[in-house]
Amino acid sequence: MARDPLERLPFLPSRDLEEHALSRYHARWYPVTLLCLAFDVEMFVFLGVLMVGVVWACRKGALRWV
């Protein structure tokens, strides 16, 4: 006996679903999200290049106190 797919969900809310969870986010926010992700990736690339420079300077002895 096939039951209703909503009854097989692991959690049922106490009230009926009015809309899908993804429909709450308007498409105009997608470019903003992509822009934020691009700047995050750019920052990680910058930090990676910076760390490579610090390691290189440490190996060359440029950061010694004496």
Image (cartoon, helix red, strand yellow):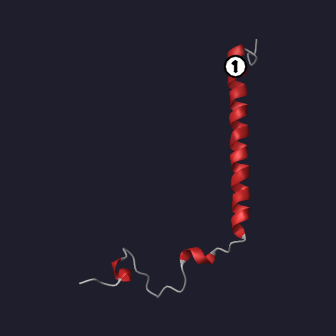
Find residue 2 and report its horizontal and vertical position in percent.
27, 83
**Rendered location of residue 4, percent (x, y):** 34, 84
Which residue lies most toward the front here? 2
Q: Residue at x 70, y 21 (%)?
A: 56
The quadrant in which residue 43 appears is top right
Residue at 40% x, 80% y: name it: 12
Q: Is residue 10 above or below residue 36?
A: below
Task: From the image, tell me which residue sits under label 1.
Answer: 58
Relative to 49, is 17 above or below?
below
Q: Residue at the spot x=55%, y=76% of the render? A: 21
Q: Position of residue 55 (x, y in %)?
A: 68, 24
Q: Residue 33, percent across and down?
A: 69, 61
Q: Residue at x 69, y 31 (%)?
A: 51
Amino acid under disc 1: Cys
Quadrant of the rendered image containing residue 7? bottom left
Where does the N terminus fall, quadrant-wise?
bottom left
